[in-house]
Amino acid sequence: MLGIYCSSKLGLSLDFLRENSSNGFDFFSLRSSEFTVGVVFPHDKQSYAHSELEEDWLLMDGFAFDVHRKRLTARELLILVRENGVKYLHQLNGEFFVSLRIKGRLFFINDFMGQRQHCVLNDEDDFAIAPSPGLVLELAKREKKINHNALFVFLITRKFRYKRETIWEGCLAIEPSTEMEVSSEKVILSRYWRYEHASSKSRLNIGSLVDLYKESVNSRILESNISLTLTGGLDSRSMIGAVSPNKLPMLKGVTMGIHGCDEIRFASEVAGKLGLSYHPFHLSPEQAFETESLEYLRHEDIDLLIQGLWSPFTKALKDSSYLLHGLDLDVTLGGIYLNEDLMKVNSQGEFKNFLMVENLRLPQARLENLIKDDSAFELDIETYFNELIDGTVEGDYAESYDKMIMSQSMNRVILQRYRGIRQQQETLSPMYDRHLMEYILSLDLRDRASYKVFFPFINKLCPDLCEVPYQRTGLPPKIPFQFWKDAQRLDGQREELYRQIALKSKGRNYLEYKKYYTNVDEWMRFNKKWMAATSDLLQSDKSIIRETLINPKEVDRLINEHQRHERSNLGILHTLMSAEIFLRISESQELINHE
């Protein structure tokens, strides 16, 4: 996997890095009197990965740009740090994780949004860093033991994590904007930037915003033969719409999805309007249980097993220079989660209730019935949400929630997904360009809510592409955003209609719902492999979670409701299945019965 590796075990085998430098990756390592540090990087990018000047050296994972968006080599960056001090790294743009030895002192510093996610083990006996928590434990030669607080929060919430803790005991996620100075005696940790809204608001200028966004996109198109993720949504459409015409030939659009899904159908239409080289990658439901897909979870943090499908997709892109992706501009600029109910919150009690309604996997009472009273969980739902709110909620509840999503959800879901992709393929995103993010944070939050800014932005940026329907609503984005919510509701009713048809006919009449790139909801009801996996993970005598943490009758009821088409219990069942895989990894069991 691409990234920085560090261990205080001086006997760190170079074979460990070699094993993680497949698929066209190379590695380089250095040893000091106290640590071994290495970097895995794309094979033709040595000048960006490491540099040495006299006694000083720098190892870098990722892409670092100066304030003018010029990409810096490792040597250029090392010279600038020698001239200006370590704090020069604090002002950089891009996505990177840097290991730096300067004047005899060892530092680790990441970018302001933490896009190059790394994890750390730090206790009295050892210190280790790697791009994923599982690899940290391998470096430290530790067993994988489940962190039950992290597992509990994963089970009950959709996108949150428990503090900095990962699924593996003793291994922490390194927060964005972190500087660590490390010695054999101590680790000095500080944050140099925090997600804050500007005290004085900028006057919205759509033209300036479009120009700023175009600069962020085009500055990241650095060479030819780049793959660009193209979906049926608006984020990737914005990204490709921002590309200068002279740079379009450097790109090829790639989409993954099941046959006939709206993702591929709309992405193909977008590519056709631009004359972009386009390559769909068709997934099958069974690929989620291939060995390579499941092995993804051995090294990863709390995640859904469906994310393993990125492995066969990104492996197919191994000949590309890197993958340019545009995930979640609808979160940062579109304010998709800043809904009307949030804007009505006026007290801390109302805010807590909003948090729970929006983020629990099931209603609180059903979740409490699902979890065994004598389980190993120390946390309960009320305690977790009280801890989440304590010290983080200010008078403006909408701004508090915005910070919470950006620090919790983005870190737990989106940036973690990028890390998973980098097992196979180098990635780069313009979505968290520093200049762009600072401008977004200077806007009135209520203008960002519910696509109020995003609608005029995308229609000015790429009006031709706004003629193509958007997969979430089925409407072309040129239709005013006031109608988008109703369109989503109507499409949800269509999915429910399909379920009712299946229910009344006892499954004989099956109308496949192909809105998104996967369809786990229906796979759990109709696909034999998924149904067998559900049984193996949650109902067999091998099921650890059934034996130790959840009530068998409750999980059986959830499965029966889902498979009889009575209601969709996709979210909680998929989460329980994923949690079971992590439990089996911790006990070194076979992840799933492949028969």
Image (cartoon, rainbow, N blue to C red):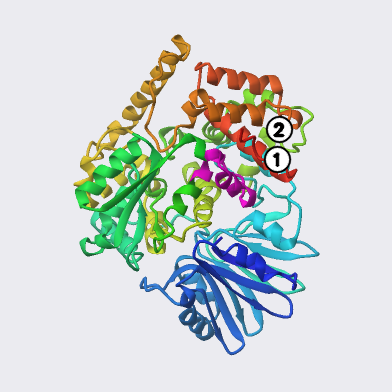
Asked if the residue under mark 1 is in contact with the one under mark 2, i.e. CB atoms within 8 Å, the reply is yes
Q: Which residues are magenta?
A: 288-309
List the residue tagged with mark 2. 545
List the residue tagged with mark 1. 583
Rendered location of residue 512, percent (x, y): 39, 25
Rendered location of residue 461, percent (x, y): 24, 52
Magenta stretch: residue 367 in it? no
Q: Residue 195 — which label? A: none
Q: CA distance from mark 2 to mark 1?
A: 7 Å
Quadrant occupied by the N terminus: bottom right
Q: Residue at x 65, y 29 (%)?
A: 536
Mainly helix, strand or loop, the magenta region?
helix
Rendered location of residue 517, percent (x, y): 41, 38
Q: Residue at x 67, y 59 (%)?
A: 136
Regarding residue 205, the answer to whether it shows in the image is no
SS class, disc 2: helix
Q: Residue at x 73, y 50 (%)?
A: 144
